Image: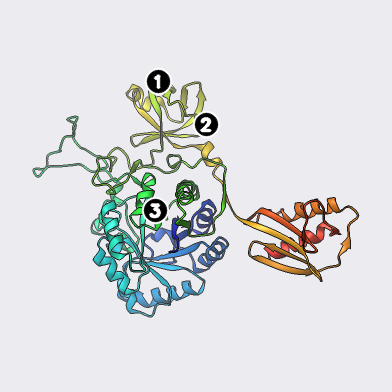
Amino acid sequence: MSNRKLTLLAPARDVEVGIAAIQAGADAVYIGAPEFGARQAAGNSVEDIATLVKYARRFEAQVLVTLNTLLHEDEYPRACALARDLYKVGVDALIIQDLRLLDYDLPPIRLHASTQCDNRTPEQIHHLQKKGFHRVVLARELSIEQIREIHHATQNSPIELEAFVHGALCVSYSGRCYLSEVLMNRSANRGCCAQLCRQRYDLLDKDGNEVLDLHGKPIHQRYLLSLQDMDRSLHLAEMIEAGVTTFKIEGRLKDRDYVTNIVAYYRLLLDQLINSNSSLEQASSPSVYQYDFTPTPTKTFHRGQTDYFLHGRTTNMTNWQTPKSTGEKIGKVVATKHNAIRVQLLSNIILHNGDGICYEDKGFAINKIEGDWIYPNIRMSDVGNQIIGTTLYRNLDTDFLRSLTAQRRIPVAIRFETTEMGYSLSIGTLNAEFEAEHQIANNPERALQTLIQQLSKLGDTHFIATTITIIANNQECSESFPYFIPISQINQWRRQLINP
């Protein structure tokens, strides 16, 4: 039986973010087409998508494109023409919601059923598989038992199961929200959600009276529909056991910093599971990653966390205080003066000038730090002593953002060998032969050192050398190489092979 390939699927607002996601460890990215995507503000040209496809191929990563809105009657021909254009540039799959597209002349491309297809029962999954879908994006609201039941019922079919593991949640079932359309004539199913779930509301009883909370205060102008963000990082192993093979990060409107941080975080977690289980493997090229930071979800956009309904209904799904990023908890305010606040910081917190600090739905930036006194960029008269005892959070860590770089390299073995007509060079799966004279070296030891040193210079390519083997006249060279080759010639051959 072949190994199960696990895919870490990342969002790409644009080509730059898509490349950053792959560099951070994504096995695949999903990106919006010029139109018909469920995030109208995140469309990309076919030419840009082609650029991303070309880059992804370096790492055997995939590019999926969202055509997941509901279409008007006159839009189907245009959507099909777009699908053909995307197929021609090498896109790996289309994510769709509108099943009527299947009645049209689509190219022979993989189809993935969007979560908005209401993918929550074995019967629905079977139906989609018969329709020609290769993968379904499971409803976010499913429990681990329901996912396991679907896997058990469909394990003899070729259909793949994809599930969300991180990111923003829609308050409506599986993203099927009509609130924006009813109140503002902006349909979420047409990519124009007005984010009304992130607004303030009053909670009234049937007689129009404000309902009181547990502290006896009216539930007035609070963010009653705003869910915390999904975070299932602690449950990846059981999701794998339940049959999930693609782990999806939400966020096609998120920036490069967010995507780099979150992808790196899940890459490390998935690699731990893959390395400890010989039956699992990474879907794209296994790589060596260099992160100049420690991936931490609270360091970029973060509304708190919930595993949602994975283990049944929980009490921490919402945050009535704010729909904004809260980030990481840093401590409590213990004193104030006319232009500063004194904070009792948690032991692991180091603040920097320019950091963003928030509490409830308010916030400020740090102008200056002196000891445990923080000087904000707002007047203290705006908050007064009522801030004493308040828990503060940092939602912008300037030092962390400056460190957010990730590099991905494919480990390769390099082999250099003499041939009858010259030399041959192999770097991973790439190989070439070069005609050249075998010129006897005056210093064979130095000749070997030079050859190894120059062949290992893979620079800004996506390769990193794991081993370098030098063969001369059918003998492996460990101490010397009998022939002299100019450094410029070695470099030219290396560049010719890896940058054709």
Q: Nearer the viewer, residue 273 or 172?
A: 273
Tell me, for residue 105, which label it has, or none.
none
The residue lying at 40 percent from left, 25 percent from top is 380
Is disc 1 placed on a helix, strand or loop?
A: strand
CA distance for labels 3 and 1:
40 Å
Q: Where is residue 156 drawn, in percent x and y?
A: 33, 67
- 261 displayed left or right of 96: right
Residue 353, disc: 2
Which residue carries the number 1 mark? 336
Marks 1 and 2: in contact by CB < 8 Å? no
Quarter of the image with the C terminus is bottom right
* x 46%, y 31%: residue: 377
Which of the marked residues, 3 or 2, is nearer the chain's N terminus?
3
Whole-percent x, y for residue 388 in the image: 35, 22
Q: Are marks 3 and 1 in contact (CB under 8 Å)?
A: no
Q: Which residue is mark 3?
A: 250
Viewer-closest of 474 and 143 = 474
